[in-house]
Image (tube, coloured by chain):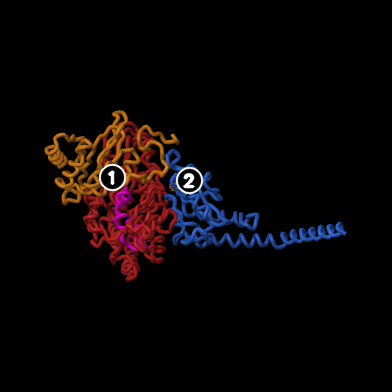
Amino acid sequence: MVVAQQQKDGAFQLLVGKIDDVLQYAIGDPMRYLANWGRLYSLWPVHLETACCSVEIGAAAGSRFDMERFGALEAFGSLRQCDLLIVMGTVTRKLAPRLKLVYDQMAEPKWVIAMGACSITGGLYFDSYNVLRGIDDVIPVDVYVPGCPPRAEAFLQGLVLLQEKIRRAPSLSGR
Amino acid sequence: MRARAFAARITEKFPDVKVDWMKERRLKVSTTADRIAEVGVFAKEGLGFDHISTVSGIDWIAKNELEVVYFIGSTTPGQEDFVLALSEHVQRSNPVVPTLMHVWRGVEYHERETHEMFGINFQGHPNQNHLYLPEDWNDLPPLRKDYVSPGR
Amino acid sequence: MTVQAEYSPDADRIMSVSLGPQHPGAGHFRIKLWLDGDYVVRSEPDAGYVHRGEEKMGEYRNYIQNVPHLERPVILDSSNILFPYALGVDELMNLKVPQRGQYLRVIMSEANRIISHMYFIAIQGLFLGHTTLITWCMGDRDFWIDFAERIGGARVTFAYIIPGGVRNDIPPGAIKKGLETCDWFDKRMDEYEKIFFQNPMVHQRSDGIGVLSRDDAIAFGATGTVARASGLAVDVRKDEPYSAYEDFEFKTPVMTQGDVYARSYVALLDMRESVKIIRQALKKLPQGPVRLKLGPQPRVPAGEVYSRTEAARGEMSYYIVSDGSPRPYRLKIGVPSAKNLGVLPHLLRNVHVADIPPIYWGLNYWPVESDR
Ligand code: SF4
């Protein structure tokens, strides 16, 4: 009796497992695609200027280069709404804890673009006593945009690359 | 030359003030830490140098001295193009100088910067916390010559 | 509008708030505020988020290697921060820069002044709730960037003004393009006046806010647009004509209200003068070489020099001490933002919280420049 019951349960579980798999393939993948597709055209960058590269962000957000047409708009709101952190150049020792704090406050999924030679390797300031040599030790980076400063076009290309990465993200969570 | 005239007026009043160099529109005089406030007041009230431009420190490590230089411009008509540099020397081991905030109000942040970059103590300054360096900086002041940047 | 608020010893009433470094109203900069309700009782600026040790780096590099990193602190205005450096090294080495080089220095410096002021006015428009101005200015700024790019070869970091002259000659076609840009921009500035500076809304939000008196401007050592908006006519171009500025006709715009409105409007008047200077310089551009050839590691005789020029934000000065070696012994950069920093806590007292962004930005304070 007990054995029969167990067999029945096992079969049920097997069936459920199968349905899960089937659903995963039938719905999960389109869902993943849909969710990530939704994310990629509504990126909200944090307004955290770290150094001089922010001038080129200003130009990219301005009317000539207009990064809004790619679906990214400077969000002047709460950090909790933001999902993109653009590190605009040099991160100093004083700023690094704040950068981490800002990153930790953002809700998942979140992405980071490291803009400028300074945020990638320290750039021109490789021998300065107050500059971090790259931000990889502080936060994980998704896209690197080299240049000093990168032209606005280069930054926009980095943005498009990030969107491509989000489109191909393997899971529903966007990572 | 105007620089010579200014130098003459300063040395007439303060005979121990040394004239370091003169150029057409610049004059650098140096004095000691205990006389600088008097010279400053005279430069402001007597000579019309009222518009502080900047303050700089220099580390003369070979002479074992630190130097503070005040660059003072003027808004007095006719001498706007002239900059007076007023300097003082102190020992590296005990760098204490008086603040000149009561003479030129605007030196506050310049002195604060000189304090953290050279470790010079400005007596009477209301706030000498770190301004540009991180709060937890516990190394030598970075612009001293014996401080070596970690990348070098 | 006057606001009556006394600093109260009643500690519970006072709330301390930190504005920045991540805040729409303050990029890479923090202001510590003590508030009593909606009034700011006291404030203290906290700079240093972009302190990169330029002065120490200057001691590790020779006089030519110093050029590229020195223009980074004020990337909006990159020619103007190199200008006094070039003048200082010229003076130390006793170089006579050719006349064409002097004219090109002036042209580039004035173009950069416009680029910088456009950014300033754009963000000021944003802070005063005028979104049209930011889109206009950000777009129009790029025409001047294009002009400068033709000459200097980069969008913002030109490294154009160097010791001994300028890096390269002006390419053919740039003169015509520059004159066209000047004509177009003159008309454009009239439109800015109409849409922004004569707008009653802008007047309401900026008139009488953050008033700095002339005496205070002198006492705090304010320079540039801040000083000129308070009736203090300081302009190194006039006071101490360097380079080729004697050859041009221009005025020093001065206003007397000393409030946020005046500080924004002075920038526009400044740009009008800059356009005049650029037009005259392009028309009168003399022939000849543009620079003196220096070696890659020039020997600079021992000596000291204090050189200054008028940058977009005010008086930019360098104190260079040379001990005869290829590297400077001491390189002090006296930047206008640092000179105006003391004004900020003075103005942020007894004001409404809503007035903080326009007051802060009205000082034309650029944290990267101030921190070096
Ligand atoms: S990469 Fe260049 S432009 Fe960007 S922050 Fe660093 S120095 Fe400035």
Three-letter amino acid code at disc 1? His
Residue A12 included in the magenta stretch of the image: no
What is the magenta range?
A: C335-364
In which quadrant will I find the N terminus of chain C? bottom left
Q: Chain B drawn in what color?
A: orange
Q: Which mark is residue C298?
A: none
- Residue C159 is situated, as x and y percent measured from the top left of the image, at 38, 45
Task: Give the chain letter at badge 2.
Answer: A
Residue at mark 1: B125
Badge 1, how many Cα within 10 Å: few under 14, some, many 20+?
some
Q: Mark 1 falls on what kind of element?
A: loop
Q: Is residue C270 above or below residue C56?
A: below
Q: Chain A drawn in what color?
A: blue
Mark 2 to mark 1 CA distance (whole Å):
39 Å
Task: Name the image quarter holding residue C359.
Answer: bottom left
In this rendered view, identify the residue nearer to me: C21 or A174. C21
**Residue found 31% across the figure and 28% down from its top:** B62
Are both tags, 2 and 1, on one chain? no
- Residue C125 is situated, as x and y percent measured from the top left of the image, at 37, 63
